[in-house]
Structures are given as C-alpha cells and as structure tokens.
Image (cartoon, rainbow, N blue to C red):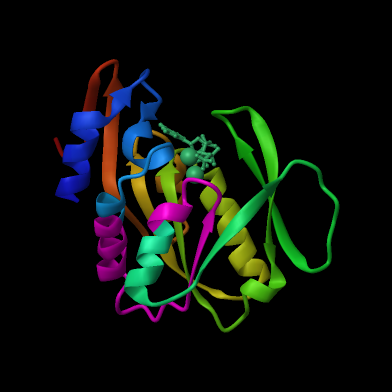
C-alpha cells in the first residue's frame, strides 16, 4: 500500500535493526484518514470472503480494525490482555509471549462475541514473531469459527512470524512489508 509506505518513510523511525517506531500515526497518535485508507484496503482484499467478524488485540490493533469493520460492515472484537490467569468459563483464552517485551500475557475473548458460524478476519498492527496472531488464531479455533485470513498493517518480513503462518497455509495480507531496518533507514520487501 503506497500511501502507507510513504508515511513510514516520512515518519517512521528505525530505532535499531529490529524495531520500527511509528508513534506519530499508529501506536500513540493515530492518523484517522490514513487509518480509514488502511481499513478500506483490508476490506478490498477480503471483500469476497464472507467475513462476519474482525478479531484483533488491544491496543494498537483496534484502530485499523475498526476502520476495516466499518468498510466491511462487520463488528470488531478485541482480545483483552490479562496479567494473571484466573480461569473463567465464559472466555476463550490463549497465552501470548512477547519476545520484544519479554513477558507473557494471557489474552481473553468472551464466548458471547465469537461463535462457530463466524468467518473471522484477524487484524493486527505489527507482525514480528507472530505470537499475537497465533494466539488470536488459537482463539478462533477454540470457538470453532472459520479463519479467513490475517491482515497486518506492517509486517517485518525479516522476523519469522509471517513465514510461520504462511507455511501453515494461512493467508496473510500485509499492507507494508519491511525487509530490513537499519538506524535511520527502512527497506521494504522488493526494493
Ligand atoms: P509478535 O506478536 O509478532 O510475536 O510480536 P512481539 O511479541 O515481538 O510484539 C510485542 C509488541 O510489540 C506488540 O505490541 C507488537 O505490535 C509490537 N511490535 C513488534 N515489533 C514492533 C516494531 O518494530 N515496532 C513497533 N512500533 N511495535 C512493534 P503490543 O505489546 O501488543 O502493544 P500495543 O501497541 O498493541 O498496545
Ligand atoms: Na499489536
Ligand atoms: Na503494538
């Protein structure tokens, strides 16, 4: 998605060879017009897939997901992060380990908001090692719903998450794919 790549070039900051900071439009401040374009792009890519619900994770997945939900005319559910594990019957839960933050969160989704007849589009802001996406997919499976695919705003293709999901036969649609980061420089896939 050209507009997104331009925004990343203009405002993204490669903090290291691993981390891209995009606080000015995605992770702290949000650019509503860009977010709407992002939502419409996800909707275009999944328009023929019979999506009934979008599933994301708080907090940075919510903005692009709401815009995609608006464009597709479907509700958006966000998994909540819980520190402690107090098993509750009315919730699906999965463990998500963050290599970046070196912590494990339990994520939960109420059984009321995800059902077996759903065709689910999973959306997140970043795809790095894929732990968040895999946790969300685990929850889709627990609900016995159908996974249509995964929509990602920024994939870091030099990390393993995207490949792991695709090897499992999961459709992954990334709007921008970052092949390499160096201090002050972002290289997109195919460049
Ligand atoms: P993974 O899910 O793909 O395995 O990623 P990882 O655990 O490494 O990511 C942990 C958090 O860091 C996630 O946000 C993820 O979106 C974010 N993240 C990963 N790589 C980058 C990056 O290069 N730049 C930025 N800006 N964020 C990155 P989170 O903890 O869920 O926080 P929130 O922002 O959604 O609240
Ligand atoms: Na995220
Ligand atoms: Na994030």
Answer with left or right where residue 112 lies relative to residue 68: right
Q: Which residues are magenta?
A: 36-64
What residue is shown at x 63% (from left), y 27% (from top)? 102
Give the residue furthest to the bottom: 117
Work out whether residue 182 or residue 124 is closer to the camera in this orientation and state it: 124
Residue, x 45% and y 51% (percent of image)? 124
The x, y position of residue 98, in whole percent, is 59, 35
| 158 or 10, nearer to the observer | 10
Provide residue 86's location: percent of width, then percent of height. Answer: 85, 51
Image quarter (top left, top right, bottom left or bottom right) of the C terminus: top left
Q: Answer above or below: position of 33 versus 184.
A: below
Q: Position of residue 182 (x, y in %)?
A: 28, 18
Q: Is residue 103 above or below residue 61?
A: above
Count of labels in the image: 0
Relative to residue 41, is residue 20 drawn left or right? right
Q: Nearer the viewer, residue 140 or 158?
A: 140
Question: At which x and y percent is residue 166?
Answer: 40, 54
Q: Residue at x 23, y 27 (%)?
A: 186
**Would you say residue 22 is visible in this rendering?**
no
Determine the residue positioned at 63% across, 73% down: 113
Q: Quadrant of residue 22?
A: top left
Does the magenta segment cover residue 51? yes
Q: Is residue 124 magenta?
A: no
- Any part of residue 85 in sight: yes
């Amino acid at each position: 998605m050209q507009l997104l790549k331009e925004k990343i070039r203009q405002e993204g900051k490669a903090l290291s060879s691993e981390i891209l900071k995009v606080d000015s439009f995605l992770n702290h401040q949000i650019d509503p017009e860009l977010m709407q374009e992002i939502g419409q792009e996800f909707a275009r890519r999944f328009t023929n897939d019979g999506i009934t619900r979008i599933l994301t994770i708080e907090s940075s997945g919510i903005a692009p997901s709401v815009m995609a939900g608006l464009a597709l005319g479907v509700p958006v559910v966000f998994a909540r992060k819980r520190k402690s594990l107090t098993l509750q019957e009315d919730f699906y839960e999965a463990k998500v380990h963050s290599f970046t933050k070196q912590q494990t969160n339990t994520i939960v989704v109420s059984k009321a908001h995800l059902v077996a007849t759903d065709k689910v589009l999973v959306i997140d802001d970043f795809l790095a090692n894929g732990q968040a996406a895999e946790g969300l997919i685990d929850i889709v499976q627990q609900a016995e719903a159908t996974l249509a695919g995964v929509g990602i705003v920024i994939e870091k293709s030099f990390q393993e998450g995207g490949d792991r999901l695709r090897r499992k036969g999961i459709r992954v649609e990334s709007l921008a794919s970052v092949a390499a980061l160096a201090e002050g420089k972002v290289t997109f896939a195919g460049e």
